[in-house]
Amino acid sequence: MRNILLAEDDPHTIRLLTMWLTRYGYNVIESRNGREALEILEREPVALLITDVNMPHINGMQLVRSVREELKLDVPVIMFSSRCDQASIAETLEGFDVRLYAKPFVPSRLLNLIERILQPVASGN
Amino acid sequence: MSSGFPCDKGASAPPWEVSDLGDPPARRYRGGLVTALKARIKEFWLAEELPRWFGLSLVILYFGSLWGVHVLSIRQAEEAQRQEALRRSAEFLAFAADRCADLAPLEEARWRKILHDVGSIDGFMALRAVDESGVVRASLNSDEVGQAAALPIEWLGSAPTIRQLDESASDAGGRVRWLQAPFSAPGGGEGVWSLVAQTGLPPILFLDRISFFRPLYVVLLAAGGLYLIYHGARSQMRTKNAIAQRIRRNAEKLDESLHELRLVDERDELASLWNRWVALIEQLRLEVRRSEAAEELHRVLTHSAGGRLSEALETLPDGLMHLSGEGTVEYSNARARGLFKLPAPGEDKPTTLAEAGNEAIRKVVESARRPGSGFDPRNEVVPSADGKSYHRVRVIPMAGTQSEDACLITVADVSQQVRADRAREDFVSQVTHELRTPLTNIRAYTETLASGMFEDPKVLSECYNVITKETRRLSRLIEDILNVSQMEVGTLQLHVDDVDLKTLITEAVRDVRGLAEEKNIDLRAMLPPRVDLIKGDHDKLAVVMNNLLGNAIKYTREGGTVTVSCQIKSDEALVSIKDTGIGVAPEDHERIFEKFQRAQDEEVMKQVGTGVGLYTAREIVRRHGGDIGLISKKGEGSTFIVRLPHEGSRASM
């Protein structure tokens, strides 16, 4: 299962990530905001959740909390954050098993990270 | 010691000096006897002695007459008694004489016995039978028999009937009563004999002891009782006189010391009541003086610098309070009383901090209290109960002043600052986020290009487009931020030159066309063929256009329309941007132009924005001397109208 759920409101970022992820053979599901993301998580099996911090309605941190506490999903999460916010976000999300990745990101390096995360889970390419 | 009448200070001094009017006055007579007499009469009159003496004389008269009447009645009774005794004696003698007429002559023994019986019964001293020639024929005293009877001179003739005669005895001092009762000679003779009796009477003195003294005792007793009553009344009268004297003396004005009105000795209840009354008046006067002094003080305070300061403090928009170490509110201006929610100050009781109704502010002050005494300094911002306002509470200990334990408390409304600070913080975080996004994209897409992983020309051209667009977006954003900073500081400078509005609008439209296409929005520009040049700063006006157009597109849903039109009038240039978007509610019309403010609307919140676009645009337009107007209703689209001043008409190139 190579489903990656993308929760991001900036269309350019979505476009870019989708381009790269599809290139690498992942299936990208887009959601423009946190609410959509939760709905999708309830319906579909997702191998990885990539989310931004700032989103309308439900922001990234609330999304993670909902995923972990309400949906009780173990799905790995990558959260985009700014370098200066990283410390405070890490504190807030302590214990929630979230990987923080600083924006602006370098796509290739991000892809490496994703591979590393999903490698043990992926059952045959 | 001596106290003359103050009311006649101008007149001559009184002829006597009075030591104390309550006691029997010790008088020293000055001047002649006549003046003394006149003065005495005056005093007599004033002191109401006349009625007193008159009453006394009446009483004496009454008792005297009582006594006299009593004496007379006793005497009359005595006289009647005597008359009665006399009558009885005479009757008896007559009876005895009748009996003697029956007697035979010369029965002496029988005569004697009869006489003895008669005499002893009535207590006759002497009793004799006398014949017509005056010779004693029989008698109690047998020595008299045969002698000539001793008769009063007046009785030398024969007695026609019973007669009596009182005469004083020559010796012994008593009185004698002669009684004679005729009877016809015994034995049937022709002569008239008589019985002559003598009785003693007690001496009748003019000053009879019993009749004189008995009523006197009664009178004296009554007089004594009356005197006691009088004495009691007199002392009251004296008190009344003393009071009257004092009042008369002070009738003109209330003296410095009411003490002089007091009576020296409280001999009765009236006097003590009077003194109590005087004491009350003294107290009252003291109170009046005290309240007068307080009024004077108050007047001085309110009219002095202190008073003006107090007025000034009352109008201060910040709350000011002087709190003592124990927690009593020494001073508080109107604002402080309102903010602390203090109850209105009671009559005597000072307000305490504990009575303050505003929990939040009170807690700050209480936390500043040091356990021993005094206060620690505090400077805290406290939100109000409803969260709509914020107040900065400062506790300033007054160490080094006279009231070392006290503190000064100021409460200032900093709601606006807090809100502004919050908005600015939000702005900063928003801005950083917004800066980051295009940067991220630029970097990512640049790397995508550089990676060489994508050879599809469509993808490549897309990358280039995105990079270009995002770069522009970034530069616009930075421009926005710079403008805002400059406007805050006040250093925004306009480089005024000729501006062709047509060009301006066309450029702006081109800039945002990409965005419009993404959302399938129909973007049109309706411009007249020729447009006059206006004076303005091209770059800044471009910012205005971009902001307004960007907003129009941002807040219009897919498939909507955005129309830009321009019109030049004689004195102004109008550019209107009309969209079919979500619209702006009338209550937000003014707010959205403010810094960091966005309409409180879900649709708007969905969009990402810094909240400075409209603020920047309006500031720039206002700097040009114009303004931006808005026609909009929620859900019915918006029309923003930019008005720029324009002088005369100049042809465009």
Image (cartoon, rainbow, N blue to C red):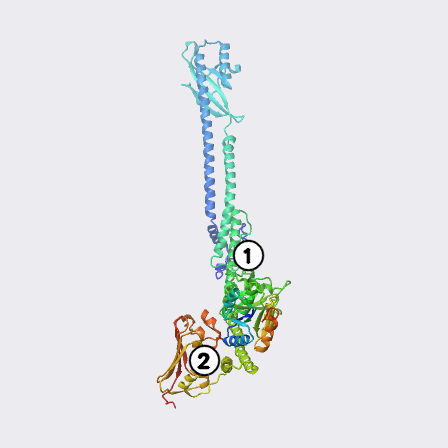
Q: Secondary structure at mark 2?
A: helix
> Residue shown at 44%/18% (left/top)?
B91
What amino acid does circle 2 point to?
Answer: Gly
Q: Earlier in the sequence, mark 2 or mark 1?
A: 1
Is label 2 in contact with label 1 (beta carbons under 8 Å)?
no
Q: Secondary structure at mark 1?
A: loop
Q: Which quadrant is the N terminus of chain A positioned in?
A: bottom right
Residue toward you, B429 or B348: B429
**Residue B496 x %, y %:** 44, 87
From this view, report whether residue B325 is shown above or below residue B416.
Answer: above
- Is residue B98 visible in the rendered structure shown here? yes
Number of numbered discs visible in the structure rendering: 2
Instruction: Report which residue position mark 2 lands on.
Output: B514
Instruction: Report which residue position mark 1 lands on.
Output: B2
Residue furthest toward the bottom? B653
> Residue shown at 47%/18% (left/top)?
B196
